[in-house]
Amino acid sequence: MKRGWIALWVGLAGWGGIGCAPETATLDPAIEKQLVEEMETERQQTETTIQITTLSNDSTSVSRVQMWEAEGMKISVTESTGVLPADDLTYSVQASSNGLGVDVWLEKTNDGFSIRSYTLDSSYAQPASEFAFWMQFLFTWRDGQIVGLNPAYRFTKEGNTITASLMDLEEAEADFMEQNDRTVNDLNRVEIYKDEYVLTFDRQEDWLSLRCLRDRLMETNGSVSVVNTETTWMKTAPFLSKEEQAQIGQIVARLLEDQ
């Protein structure tokens, strides 16, 4: 996931001789045009436009989502068509591009849609890309190096298992209501998601596993139900470089010892 925008700086200087002031050369228009075309080609190669179907209670909408790789996966909704019911605030969608599966939850806003959350679907995602995707979320990075744990998550330890929790259901519900200036009684349907990532690490076997546990709280006409969905990924160290193995191993081992 290292591809992205290329910043190209061209500096040309000519010297007339010893003791002469530097002279700045101008870039030939043909070369400049070629460089611009190459940068545009690079941009197009690193962007993929995909069609996704948004499902709701009584209508369907098709949205265009753009995905591209930079320091991590970036997803943005660029266009939406179709009619969506006013009382549906969130929509679950699925998409696949370049072997990478993505589940996206869209939240309707006055301007269209915003993405509330998105996860990888292991049923059709490439293992290496999938694992690297989650590593971007659970750890903080600087200059391509893992420098610590993501402060947005709450990490707890039990034995050799570390659980990274983004928020619990109560916090998620309160956050959702506050952002939308709504109460539960105002809604015909509310879906709240809690994402938990469970890491296990064995220092002797160099075994690293990652599990995503998602709880969905649904409220329909005053009736609350919780649907638990669990997706498990088991990944071994060969999916990572030696440097990444060492970085993650040190961080996880330190976390196991400190807590």
Image: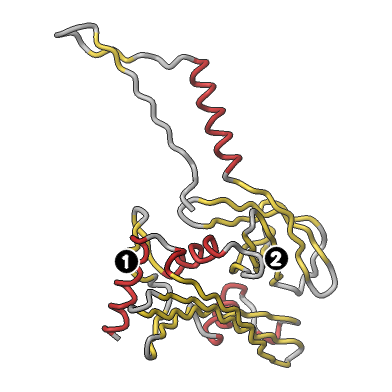
Residue 181, relative to residue 24: is it above or below? Answer: below
- Mark 2–mark 1 Cα distance, whole angstroms, equals 34 Å
- The vertical placement of 184 against 102, above or below, is below
Q: Which of 258 and 122 is in front in this view?
A: 122
Residue at 20% from the left image edge and 6% from the top image edge: 17
Q: Earlier in the sequence, mark 2 or mark 1?
A: 2
Name of the residue lying farthest toward the left: 19
Q: Percent position (x, y) of residue 184?
A: 66, 85
Q: Looking at the rendering, which quadrant does residue 172 occupy?
A: bottom right
**Left or right: 135 in relation to 228:** left
User: Can you tell which of label 2 and label 1 is closer to the viewer?
Assistant: 1
Name the residue at 46% across, 71% down.
Answer: 236
From the image, tell me which residue sits under label 1.
246
Who's the residue at 45% across and 53% down the image? 71
> What residue did someone put label 2 on?
94
- SS for callout 2: strand
User: Tell me, what colour scheme is on the image?
Assistant: secondary structure
213 relative position to 242: left or right: right
**Residue type of the residue flagged with mark 2:** Gln
- Element on which disc 1 rests: helix
